Image (tube, rainbow, N blue to C red):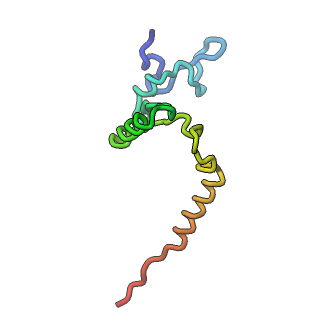
Amino acid sequence: MQSPRASLESNGQPQGADADGQHSRRPTSLNWTLDGLLSIGTNFVPVTRVSASLSPENLLDIISHHEHKGLPLIVEGWHLKEGWDSELMSPDWLARKFKERQESQTNWQLPSITH
């Protein structure tokens, strides 16, 4: 088995071959692996993924731990839980929130300076 770096060119780009087995300089994800991407830079980090169906106590412990450590976390299926507001994070909701944010920034004024 090749090491994750074995499939990368010296410039960090992955090696690839076309259908005839000829070396290709076209962008490709051929031979890319998660371990390989993680080993060549700091732009990628593994992210923990948990199910929203965990017990509330367990889920809150996991969320608190990741929040305290500043680590990313993916909670899968939260939108499927009973009581989830289907309007939350919808395109309409985001558009309203963005508009409110723009309006509040537009209406903000510097205080006048008097001598």
Q: Residue furthest bottom?
A: 115
Task: State which quadrant residue 23 falls in.
Answer: top right
What residue is rendered at 33% in x and 43% in y? 68
Task: State which quadrant residue 114 falls in.
Answer: bottom left
* Viewer-side residue, 19 vs 22: 19
Q: Is residue 19 positioned above or below 11 on the image?
A: above
Q: Residue furthest top?
A: 1
Q: Is residue 109 positioned above or below 73 on the image?
A: below
Instruction: Point out residue 18 in the picture as x, y percentages from the top left corner.
Output: 63, 17
**Screen quadrant of the C terminus:** bottom left
**Screen quadrant of the N terminus:** top left
* Viewer-side residue, 85 vs 75: 85
What residue is rendered at 57% in x and 44% in y? 83
- The answer to whether 98 appears left or right of 70 in the picture is right
Instruction: Point out residue 25 in the picture as x, y percentages from the top left corner.
Output: 58, 24
Instruction: Point out residue 49 in the picture as x, y percentages from the top left corner.
Output: 47, 31
* Viewer-side residue, 37 vs 67: 67
Q: Is residue 106 positioned above or below 3 on the image?
A: below
What residue is rendered at 47% in x and 21% in y? 8
What residue is rendered at 60% in x and 62% in y? 99
* Viewer-side residue, 37 vs 96: 96
